[in-house]
Image (cartoon, helix red, strand yellow):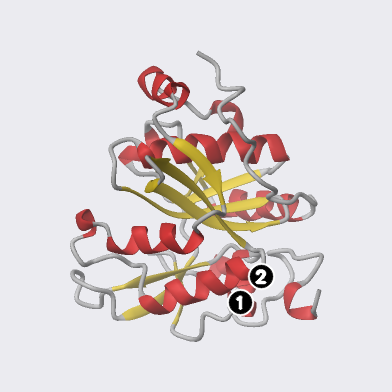
Amino acid sequence: MTDAFSSRPSPFIASAYFSDARTADESGLAALGGPMTPEVLYDAYTHGIFPWPFSSAGFGPPDRLGWFSLDPRGVFEFDSFHVPKRLARICRSGRFRVTSNQDFRGVVRGCALTPYRDGASWVTPSLYRAYVRFHELGFAHSVEAWQDDKLAGGVYGVAINGLFAAESMFRIEPDASKVALVALTEHLKARGYRLFDIQMVTPNTERFGAVGISREEYLRRLHDALKVRVTFGTLEDGWPKRLTP
């Protein structure tokens, strides 16, 4: 591992590319522009910062690259993640076959191109290329939900030591992305991840128990999570074996 991908990262060690995340403005904006190389992405995530292209006009396709450290920060707590009964039945029904890292590119493309995005997705071509490269280096992963051997939905994100930072999810078939999210959450918990970052709490994630924590608390928990050596591995065949009724 090169110096660019430190084996002992911490948000409290000075970044090579960004100011301290605690200096972000009221919107959470920490920086503008710059490259999305693997080295910069690694540095950003290990310092509590993530890329988020946005439209300077406030609507429509993004035309600027922002780097954000939100306050509050959305997270899923593994011990209080809530699976609605109806969704648990769907997970157990076998309607979807769930895999990991079988079609990372397809999941990211799905997040960018599914019709309900209305052309305003923040998953730009440059961001797509950046995360594909990050995936090739082992830092980005996907969980896919398949129906009749066709990709029906999925979720992807970044994994560095004990941190998993979810980036986006999509669905073509109803409930497919939710099934992928449940599978991902159970997998992360089983592997020993400590921090499940979802950037912000939305009405959709709130149904699963998402909560917002302060930036200060997030950075403390990130520091602790980055000290934990876990790997993403492969989603267990035949999931869901452990999902409770």
State the residue position of label 1. 38
How far from the left and from the top, in percent, is residue 132?
52, 70
Question: Please, what is the three-letter code of the amino acid marked with disc 2?
Answer: Leu
Looking at the rendered structure, the kind of residue marked 1 is Pro
Q: Nearer the viewer, residue 170 or 48?
A: 170
Label 1's element?
helix
- Label 2 to label 1, Cα distance in Å? 8 Å
Q: Residue at x 41, y 75 (%)?
A: 66
Left or right of 79, for residue 54: left
Q: Is residue 205 visible?
A: no
**Mark number, residue 137:** 2
Q: Are marks 2 and 1 in contact (CB under 8 Å)?
A: yes
Q: Residue at x 68, y 64 (%)?
A: 11
Which residue reaches farthest top? 245
State the image coordinates of residue 215 (x, y, percent, origin top left): 55, 54
Name which residue lies at 59% across and 33% down: 186
For the residue labelled by badge 2, is the local secondary structure a helix, a strand or a loop? loop
